[in-house]
Image (cartoon, helix red, strand yellow):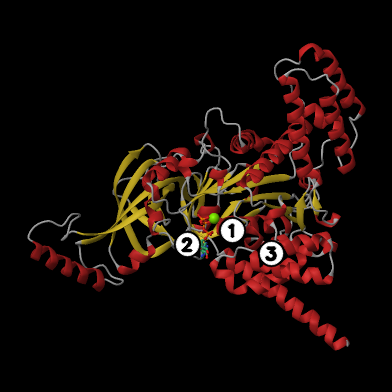
Amino acid sequence: MITFVKGLEGTLIRMQEDPEARYEFEIWFDYTRQAMNLIREGALLAVPNFASEAAASHRSILEVVSILPLHYGLGDNPQGYPGFVVEAARSAARDWEEQEHEPTEDVTKIRCIAIPTNLEIVERNGITELQEESNLPMIGAKALLLDTPSTEYVLNSGLPVGVPTFTVGNLVRDPQVGVKISAEDLLRTHFAIFGFTGAGKSNLVSTLVDKVMQAYTLMEPPPDTPRENVKVVLFDLMSEYSVLLADWLVKAPDAALLVLTEETLPEDVLQFMEQPSNETFSQALTALTQTTLYPRALIGRRSDFRFAWRRLLNPKSARLHLYREKPPSLGRLVERHWQPRGTLGRNDAAIRQAVRNWVITHYDTPFDEANARKLNDWIDEMFENGLLTTNDAREAFTALRAAVEEAHRRYISLRHVNDAYQMTLGDLITRLNDPHTSGLYVVQSHDPDRLRDFAAMLGDVMFENRRKSGKISPLVVFIFDEADEFIPQRREGADDSYARSRFVVMTLARRGRKFGLGIGIATQRVRYLDTSIMAQPHTYFVSKMPRQSDRQAIAEAFGIAEEMFAQTFKFKKGDWLLMSHDAIGLEAVPVPIHCEDANQRVEAFLNQLKSEWQRSREVARTRE
Ligand SMILES: Nc1ncnc2c1ncn2[C@@H]1O[C@H](COP(=O)(O)OP(=O)(O)OP(=O)(O)O)[C@@H](O)[C@H]1O
Ligand SMILES: [Mg+2]
């Protein structure tokens, strides 16, 4: 049953073809202040269409995308004697104010621009049904405004059933209407978040991860279907998600805060990881609490984050890990880094034979302190035995020596943190492929190059692994906040961490879908992104974008009119224009929603941890 707001009736005045939205409609309503507050962007209207017949009425559903109060006495563009213009404006103001519920003046109208939702309501023998639109609305026909329950029903009617869904936000114009999204379609067919700096992109990423984790871990799957799991990997260039996702890092069935480089962590934390003790624990907590980056809204709660860090650092159930790479063997190291250029002279065959012998005899010898020394001794020996008669020959061994030094820095001279705090790429991949739990993995580094290279390596291994094994689950999503740092525009001939991460992320975006690998990107710099990434995400969240070129790029990529973004100019923090080709009920129709503030969720979690701690202290005291 579709029901309408009573006493509100508009008229379809004009209709025009539109290359993006198919059609654009203009509907007028009599002005009242009440109507002005009801008819807003995102409102749904029903207008009889040409498919109507005696036995069944067909009404097209249109979505309002812009509205303007119109005063005939003023027109669109005030011109003429200034005194008259001001006088006319003042008299218009009275007309706006005096018509609260009842329209009494013919000179005031509300003009709405609307687009088709491609749905229609069919009413036959008292039964209403929603179906794909079968004809065009009739000019001059009455437009009725859908009420709250009907709006919610229509917005969410197209969602698939039996899959994890969640309410992503509420209509900006009517907070009672929840807008649902299919978790799997959102992740598998990629999503993008675009908005000016401070619009709330990172906050929204946190909210989306929260809702996805809830959908997969807390909701019961339908009877006779096994629980699906999801793995969220978040590349956190600004190290802001240890706070923004503190709750799920603590409570997710599986979670890790994976730190790639020692320099990213405070000294006291490293010392604790080397030698966990009560004393170093407390110092580590203090250091983490002081050095973490907090959003302004949570700075006041800084000391309460100790309750969260305590859980992450606890050696028995550690969730903070330092990335450790498995070093290559001595043989492999030489094989990879002894790459002579040019001529080796008369001893060519002998030198090559010596290297081959070394590689074969040390193919499985681990690269550790003692063996590294052995390798250096052998290089010295090669310099002294008279075989290296050309510059190129000597250079090949000089380069090898530098590679050994670099490998020493990278694998050996690292601090020996307790096993509980180490994680290798293999560990992470095992956890991402484990079908039994859902998990969250936040990856941080103070060095953007290391983060890009790690993203490239992880993405590549996961993609190849899935491609070769044919495995498509569990669903894994890689989220890139500050995405322009991972997928920047191509520069000819560049071979750096940018090129490597761009290549892998593009591969995931183009081909990951069928292997259960999705991506999510968030950025304010649309123009800095590799242009070919833009067409890949099927779901967009768009907030204010002051530059027209950014709005144009988004409009073009999604296939929507750029004017559609006019409503975002009025957006407050947390407001988003949500549009999707397949994750929400309305296909490719932008819906203005408000999403909750992630900071409040995190704060509620801190309160919960704090009261648990207070309770356990009381229990301990009463026992004493
Ligand atoms: N849904 C929301 N409700 C209320 N406040 C919000 C909401 N989202 C974000 N904010 C506020 O806006 C501020 C900026 O948010 P956030 O850091 O997520 O923006 P951003 O778009 O990621 O910015 P940047 O471009 O700098 O990365 C936050 O401190 C937060 O308090
Ligand atoms: Mg941000």
Q: Position of residue 79 (x, y in %)?
A: 12, 56
Residues at marks 1 and 2, CA–CA distance in whole angstroms: 18 Å
Q: Residues within 10 Å of mark 1 (few under 14, many from 20)?
A: some
Residues at marks 2 and 3, CA–CA distance in whole angstroms: 22 Å
Element type at mark 2: loop
The amino acid type of the residue labelled 3 equals Asp
Residues at marks 1 and 3, CA–CA distance in whole angstroms: 19 Å
Q: Which residue is mark 3?
A: 247
Tell which circle, 1 or 3, labels the residue nearer the N-terminal end: 1
For ligand 2, give the image quadrant. bottom right
Q: Residues within 10 Å of mark 3 (few under 14, many from 20)?
A: some
Residue 573: numbered disc? 2
Q: Residue furthest top?
A: 346
- Residue 221 figure quarter: bottom right
Say whether residue 107 is left or right of residue 10. Answer: left
Asked if ligand 1 lies within 8 A of label 2, the reply is yes
Q: Kindly report which numbered mark, 1 or 3, lies closer to the viewer in this rendering.
A: 3
Q: Which residue is mark 1?
A: 167
Above/below status of 511 relative to 473: above
**Foreground pick, 364 / 606:** 364
